Image (cartoon, helix red, strand yellow):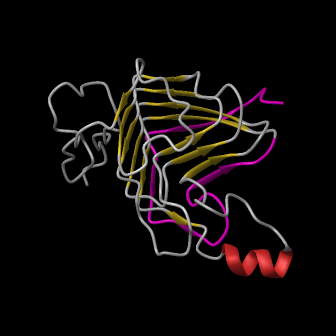
């Protein structure tokens, strides 16, 4: 279990759609992954949960929905210098011992009215590994588990450029940075 985590480095998860749970990545029970310098933007999940519940009897986070990154129980994520913005929720982590460092969560508030609860930035049960993150949006901390002395909650606009690099002063080392191309394109 968790011996060989999948690693994602400098990846962009953009405009993904999923009728059920996590719109960009689901870490199913017993899995683990490392995300470094990744961008999660405009990913929409849970838009078909009513139909899935009726047809299969399955339901997961029916009130608020899942995150662009959904970590199921008994799974683990390690997320460093990533950015989550414009998703149907940021991170939904029901795992244990996950780590989130130097990551920006900003306005993950895409919605279509199909959920009874408001969109959120982070829904995390075990927030002990959350440090040096920039978190701002309607509902920043769904469960109230984030240590505000270690993270900036209700943070101001990071002022992203067109490639989601934060332009606000003082955010060096936080969030996603696009990689320079060497292929001439």
- Identify which residue is drawn at 29% across, 36% down: 155
Q: Is residue 24 above or below residue 50?
A: above
Left or right side of 150 for 19: right
The answer to if 41 sits in the magenta stretch is: no
What residue span does the magenta drawing correspond to? Answer: 1-29
Left or right side of 39 for 182: left
Q: Nearer the viewer, residue 54 or 45?
A: 54
Which quarter of the rendered picture does the N terminus lie within? top right
Residue 152 x, y percent position in the rendering: 34, 28
Residue 132 x, y percent position in the rendering: 40, 22
Which quarter of the rendered picture does the C terminus lie within? bottom left
Residue 165 x, y percent position in the rendering: 24, 41
Q: Nearer the viewer, residue 118 or 170?
A: 118
- Identify which residue is drawn at 58% across, 74% down: 47
- Identify which residue is drawn at 19% across, 24% down: 170
Left or right side of 147 for 134: left
Q: Is residue 178 above or below residue 128?
A: below
Residue furthest to the top: 149
Q: Nearer the viewer, residue 177 or 78?
A: 78
Residue 169 x, y percent position in the rendering: 14, 29
To which quarter of the image does residue 104 belong? top left
- Identify which residue is drawn at 56% across, 56% down: 24
């Amino acid at each position: 279990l968790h011996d060989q985590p999948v690693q994602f480095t400098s990846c962009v998860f953009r405009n993904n759609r999923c009728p059920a749970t996590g719109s960009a990545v689901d870490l199913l029970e017993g899995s683990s992954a490392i995300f470094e310098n990744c961008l999660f933007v405009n990913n929409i999940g849970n838009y078909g949960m009513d139909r899935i519940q009726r047809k299969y009897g399955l339901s997961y986070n029916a009130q608020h929905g899942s995150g662009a990154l959904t970590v199921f129980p008994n799974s683990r994520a390690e997320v460093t210098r990533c950015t989550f913005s414009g998703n149907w929720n940021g991170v939904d982590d029901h795992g244990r011992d996950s780590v989130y460092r130097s990551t920006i969560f900003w306005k993950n508030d895409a919605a279509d009215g199909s959920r009874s609860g408001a969109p959120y930035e982070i829904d995390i049960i075990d927030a002990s590994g959350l440090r040096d993150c920039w978190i701002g949006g309607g509902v920043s901390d769904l469960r109230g588990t984030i240590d505000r002395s270690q993270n900036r909650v209700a943070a101001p606009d990071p002022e992203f450029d067109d490639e989601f690099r934060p332009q606000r002063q003082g955010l060096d080392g936080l969030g996603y940075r696009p990689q320079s191309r060497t292929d001439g394109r």
